[in-house]
Image (cartoon, rainbow, N blue to C red):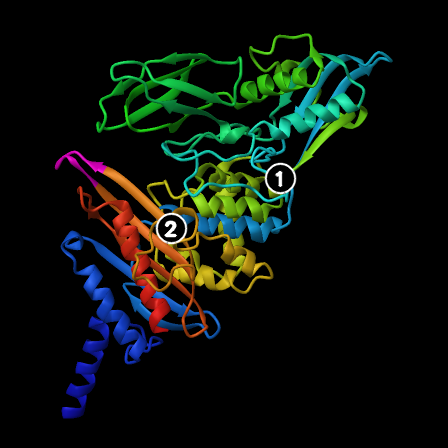
Amino acid sequence: MAGTIISLLLVLIIASAGCSGTADKTSAGSSALEKNLTTITSAPQYSHASWGLIVVDPATNQTLYEKNADEMFAPASTTKLFSSSAVLATLGPDYRTTTPVYAVGTIGADGILDGNLVLVAKGDTTMGGRTLPDGTIEFTNTDHSESGAGLTTTDPLAGLDNLSRQVKAAGITKVSDVVIDDRLFTNVQGEFMALLSPVVINDNLVDLSVTPSKPGSAPSVVMRPQTSLYKFDNRATTGPAGSATALDAGEEAGTIILVGTIAADAGTVNTTAAVTNPAVFARTLFIESLKRQGVTVAASATGDNPATKLPAAGSYGSAKEVAHLTSPPLAEDVKLTLKVSQNMHANYYIMLLALAENKTTYADGMTKEGNVLRSLGLDTTGAMLGDGAGGDRVDHVSPRTVAELLTIMSRQPYADRFVKAQPILGVDGSTVNHCANDNPACGHVYAKTGTYNYPDPLNGDNVLLSKGLAGYVDTKSGKRLVFAEYVNNVRLTDNVTADSVGTDLGSIAGQVYENY
């Protein structure tokens, strides 16, 4: 009887610690991690929060530590690990997209095309607008799709200008019209999803760099890319120094409207307006680019994309290809997506998955994602996903499933490229500011962040519904470990922010680095 009671007590002790039989909770590393983890998670701001954590050695499949690893957590942008893994497995890290331009009609000896130039959109998400001289894709630590972020040094029109130079080099001096063939798939937009379209220029955003003037006066604004397509309505004002800056912009019927206030001492602040008709946007920008290269377009640069002038789908065999643009490898785009948490690109991977099956709907792409992940050996019952970026209400994952995915990816031929595509704690991307001064793991953690805020009207504040960090740690002992950690439902205050919670998650990763 005494032996039975002792055995039962041991079982209860292990269960209360939240540990599976594979975890060595008696090790010095696990004990130290548990102690330091408790110090962080028992802080007052986490009194109503839920925590989940797992640490795995991918070399042995041993679970070194776990806490609530089978519970479901809102993953936020760590969802991008799933869509990125699936698209890499399907298309390969070196997959490139080639966008052709055809001369549909007869080119005379004088270089005049009796017909139209047609740019056939093939799903290139950057269209040369982020490509650096070495062929890599440029990113800033916070992407321009987030208000207040910096802009890349690259020209968003560089790809179109490249195509225009090729058109000129082909001997064409004048064309009747320019048409964007965007029949690859029908545009997709969800409640929490940026518009997905076959043609993408500057992430289908117009950048507005806003500089304050005197309080009470309108700020000055520079638009990027510059285009005649839009009128501009500046309804913003400059507020007193030290006041809050809150700017918003959008497109309505061909006009970009800027509203809100900017503090007099804020310096230049960037915001964006989403393009509502990407084909029209691309057509105007391409016509303006052609004109800069000396190619005349008889039709107006503004107005609708004249899709009725397109030849039958797939009938370009008799047309002359006069230009083409090849994208950087897919692995570069995945790096962009993971480093800065680029939502549109992550959701675009779902469409690429659908197209790989010769299908054209977002639902087809999600089905394909599930099939691909299962074919890699992932038990997907520990994940519920409705999108590729992390904004769908259904999105929930268990830390164990995330760790299994990361372990699988660590065994792919392109594993190192995938690992280095993650934000590096304290170095770049979305974790650049999440490494405390006393954290020894700065530069040794490669991990995707996730952040999901939502207002709480009842209490008049905001709740951090999810904050996550999942990826790889190159530990002090020389091991590369996999980890996934989540905290859900943290009330935000002046002193508790998404960044401060992110720093706590980074500190937990630092404990993994230190203790294993």
Q: Amino acid at mark 2?
A: Thr
Q: Which mark is residue 503?
A: none
Q: Is residue 463 above or below residue 377?
A: above
Q: Quadrant of the C terminus?
A: bottom left
Residue depicted at 22% across the width and 22% down the height = 240
Image location (x, y in percent) of residue 223: 46, 21
Instruction: Using residue 366 as the reference point, say whether residue 15 is left or right of it.
Output: left
Quarter of image, res 320: top right
- The secondary element bearing badge 1 is classed as loop
Q: Which residues are magenta?
A: 455-462
Image location (x, y in percent) of residue 446: 44, 57
Residue depicted at 17% across the width and 37% down the height = 461
The reply to whether residue 70 is visible in this rendering is: no
Image location (x, y in percent) of residue 32: 26, 73
Q: Which of marks 1 and 2 precedes in the sequence?
A: 1
Q: Quadrant of the N terminus?
A: bottom left
Residue where numbered disc 2 is placed: 431
